[in-house]
Image (cartoon, rainbow, N blue to C red):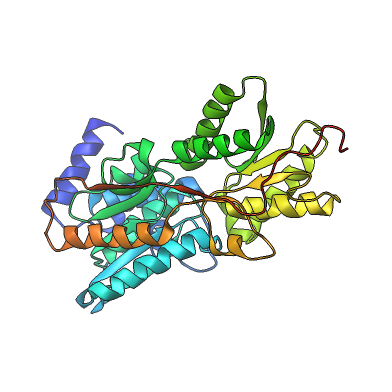
Amino acid sequence: MTAGTGDKEKRSSGTKKVTLAHVAQAAGVSPATVSMVLNRRDGVSFSDETVAAVFAAAERLGYRSAGRAAGYTSIPSVLIVAPNITNPYYSTVIQAVQQAASHRGYATCIHTTYRSLASELAALHLARSMGMSGIIFAMLAHPQEVLEKVDGKLPVVVIGDRRQNLNTDAVELDNYEAGSLVARHMHELGHRHLAYISTTLDRANPIRTQRLQGLRDTFSRLCPQGGILVKSRDIRPETELENLQIEYVIGQELAEKCLGEKKITAFVAMNDMLAYGVIDAVRGAGFSVPADYSVCGFDNIFPSGFAGVGLTTVEHYMRDKGRNALEILHEKIRGLAFRRNITRVEYGHKLIVRGSTAAPRRASAF
């Protein structure tokens, strides 16, 4: 963008009301496209790049929709943003936020992103255009791109990873140490060759990569003669939206590819949903858990404690994190905490040992 264009944008936003035409010019699209994107017109779709450009321009120029719901702002409201609601991890966090919000007198609205940058930017615009009191991100895939659009007037709390160093209020968990905890458990049982099963491993998913790094570093230190086979598959936001069972399916398919590796005696899944797919792959191939293969997950979502599952996993205190995130947001909204101060709360983690992990099978078992 040229300096002249930038000056024009500043004059437009500073001296008169910002219109759809201003947003369209800044985004390089038509006013009709801006209207359809911002109002989420049914039956019309645009590329992620177009949607992201429109929302970014609207945020940069301070555009506020004229169609804002009259009377909605009379109810203090909080927007809860999550990648999806099919994984019980996120649904548990959301319910915990809603419980705390109800106690504090807030209404809540849920926005799912499927880890799309355009959808995360849309959450900011939705909260502002509807006059909401604040936002809680149950997970933020693009923190730099999104948080730079927060102007300090809209309180935001992110539930994330300790090592992200987010410049905002956050409720955190050290996923590196969680991975290290699993590595120690597997080593103590006697396993020497593991498989790590995951969905997309990239910078937009630091929780996944930190769990893997903690697992790798600790296991290589404790068992230098051993090894970890990493199997992952990338998921596009569109795929996650269309397939409600995507994590389970990927866990199952990737585990099946590992069963031919005779040295592997244990699977570590990036989360419990993937672990369920791993367990079914092992059993579907005629093997037993844990006699033939041990399986461990992360999150300790409620089905993991079912008698037919009995998954060893890492407790991540979903309810506590959700309630605490709302309390931090409430303090910011009410002015009980200085707006310029950043509040960070870190939760520990605990290994929940159940029946899916045990000592490795004998070398001659197969």
Camera sees residue 145: yes
Report the residue at 76% width, 38% height from top.
258
Q: How many marks?
A: 0
The spot of residue 62 in percent (x, y) is: 23, 53
Q: Nearer the viewer, residue 198 or 195?
A: 195
Left or right, residue 242 beside residue 172: right
The spot of residue 146 in percent (x, y) is: 34, 46
Q: Tell me the quadrant of the picture where the N terminus can be found.
A: top left
Q: Nearer the viewer, residue 59 or 94?
A: 94
The spot of residue 284 in percent (x, y) is: 82, 54
The spot of residue 330 in percent (x, y) is: 21, 63
Q: Nearer the viewer, residue 66 or 52?
A: 52
Left or right, residue 48 beside residue 326: right
Report the residue at 60% width, 46% height from top.
235
Report the residue at 33% width, 58% height from top.
136
Q: Nearer the viewer, residue 126 or 89?
A: 89
Is 153 situated above or below 107? above
